[in-house]
Amino acid sequence: MAGEPQDDCLFCKIVAGHIPATIVRETDTTIAFQDINPQAPTHILVIPRLHHRDIATLAAAAPSVAADVLREAGEVAAQEKLESYRVVFNTGSGAGQTVWHAHAHVLGGRGLQWPPG
Ligand code: 5GP
Ligand code: ZN
């Protein structure tokens, strides 16, 4: 069921504590942890504890939790003392999404090109 933990979902396993992650912040509704394959000096993922396949689906089903993800992305940036940073939601395989549990990438610590590739 939408929102329920999925046995085959990597990020649900991190939420459950079954796969280790370097957690940098936690709230009742979100977890933020270091990306295993960082694309910038700071690369942290913010995920909802609820399982939804992408940010749009999360926002439709649980808008307050989607707002929590956005707020936590800002809190992570502040905690990491990032003056400039980027929050990215890759949505769909053509945009690079590989994990089908909504997540924000918080990237910073280097210059970031615009437009992105
Ligand atoms: P996506 O490609 O779906 O936008 O982002 C998924 C992200 O999850 C990637 O940046 C990838 O490096 C990260 N990732 C994949 N597996 C793991 C893992 O086991 N642990 C952590 N911490 N990050 C992971
Ligand atoms: Zn999940």
Image (tube, grey):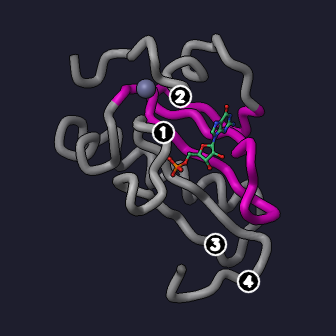
Q: Alpha-carbon distance for marks 3 and 1?
A: 22 Å
Marks 4 and 2 close (CB-CB < 8 Å): no
Amino acid type, callout 3: Tyr
Q: Residues within 10 Å of mark 2 (few under 14, many from 20)?
A: many
Which of the two marks, 3 or 1, is nearer to us in this view? 1
Quadrant in the rendering for residue 32: top right
| Disc on the earlier residue, 4 or 3 | 3
> Who's the residue at 19% across and 36% down the image?
61
Q: Give percent across and percent down for residue 1.
A: 21, 16
Q: Of label 3 and label 1, which has the lower sequence position?
A: 3
In this image, 80 relative to 7: left or right? right
Tell me which amino acid carries mark 2. Phe
In front here: 78 or 12? 12
* Position in image of residue 13 (x %, y %): 56, 17
Magenta stretch, residue numbers: 22-51
Under circle 2, the secondary element is helix
For the residues marked 2 and 1, what is the alpha-carbon distance in whole angstroms? 8 Å
Residue that numbered label 3 is attached to: 85
- Give coordinates of residue 68: x percent, y percent: 42, 44
Location of mark 4 (residue)? 111
In the image, farthest residue toward the right: 41
Residue 86, position as x, y percentages in the image: 57, 70
Q: Secondary structure at mark 3?
A: strand
Q: Nearer the viewer, mark 4 or mark 3?
A: 4
Q: Element at badge 4?
A: loop
Q: Secondary structure at mark 1?
A: loop
Disc 2 CB within 8 Å of nearest ligand 2 atom: yes
